[in-house]
Image (spheres, rainbow, N blue to C red):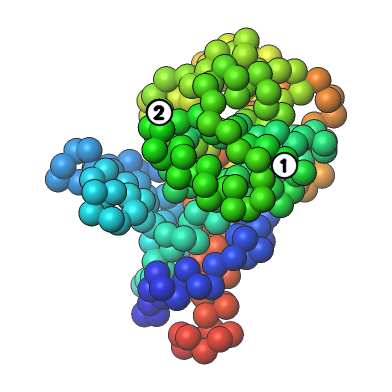
Amino acid sequence: MRYIPEEISARLATPELAAQAAMQALTAVAQSGSTTFPVVVAHGSDAKNRFSIKSGSTEQLAGLKVGSYWYANSARGVLCHSSCILLFDQTIGHIDTVIEATKANAYRTAAANALAVTHLARREASRLAVFGAGNQAFYECTALMSVRPIQEILIVNRTAARADELASKLRAKGVSVAVVAAAEACAKADIIVTVTGSRQPLFDATAVRPGTHISCMGADAVGKQELPPELLAHAQLYCDSVEQSLSIGEFQHIAAAVRAGVNRPTNLGEVLSGRSPGRIDDQAITVFDSSGLALQDLYMGALLLQEAQRQGLVESP
């Protein structure tokens, strides 16, 4: 069994590698031969410590990702989130490769958002609002700065110190940054990204301007919610996986209406493969829900393994 520790995978992971994995995974969802399985959400001995297991398979890959959130790690000077990818040898059913992939996971999550924004946000979108100031928020902002001409970032966060810390990191990237209230952020933003663990809407539906694109990155378990359901009723809806979004993602809160035939979301892979046009109206509100796709983890893991083999850091088959 091959093992790639965090210090190696963090060095190998890049936005470009993550973008390649995201494209492969999201388009695979729109094709036959790939499967994602129900997500397992569990907790540690302390019920406030959580972990999830996301698994899937394609014609070439099978495996899973374990993601954890240990709430008290900040006080220990350790990241609260961690990720580990396990790839199977499909011939004998043994684990072939274990990859610690916490930094790679941050790139992977942001890469899906960047693909969504590329196809769903207005081309001239230049003002970004981000709800949440945790570790992932920085990756989301920098990824979107690479696909849209972002000139200003508006940060909304419950804790001022965390917001100021994120603002300082983003200003070092050469962009204007302000910490504002939710209503002001929505009133000004061309793109809104939510990256929180919220269980209630972060803003009012009426605060969002026509033409805004919203990427919801935080809802990945039953009960989580970042957006007001009334906003979803008249927006154009996209996601990484329709069934997963209706089960544990943001669209769980409109699942009954969707299953009744009202405003069914579109897999982003349909847009990436040219089967759906994406944004066609500059006045439409578009929403992308990312509940975290197991196939992204598998393709990211495979690419990390390939790069590690190329550099002679692990053995080749």
Q: Residue at x 65, y 58 (%)?
A: 19
Q: Label 1 belongs to which residue?
A: 150
Residue 21 picture location, percent across and down: 62, 60
x%, y% of residue 252? 48, 25
Report the residue at 23% width, 54% height from top.
76
Q: Is residue 73 left or right of residue 130?
A: left
Residue 141 visible in the picture: yes
Q: Residue lying at the far left in this picture: please name it.
A: 45
Left or right side of 209 for 47: left
Front-lying residue, 88 or 25: 25
Along the viewing direction, whichever of 277 and 112 lies nearer the viewer: 112
At label 2, the amino acid type is Arg
Seen from the viewer's position, the closer of residues 287 and 267 is 287
**Circle 1 SS class:** loop
The residue wearing badge 2 is 158
Left or right: 249, with 1 as reference point: right
Place of residue 234 in the rendered image (x, y in percent of width and height, measured from the top left): 68, 14
**Secondary-structure class at tag 2:** loop
Tell me where residue 239 appears, x and y as whole percent: 61, 36
Instruction: Check disc 1: other Cα within 10 Å, few if <14, some if 14-19, many if 20+.
Output: many
Quarter occupied by the N terminus: bottom left
The Cα atoms of the two marked residues, 1 and 2, are separated by 23 Å
Note whether 290 is above or below 9 in the view shown. above
- Towards the viewer: 179 or 49: 179
Q: Is residue 215 visible?
A: no
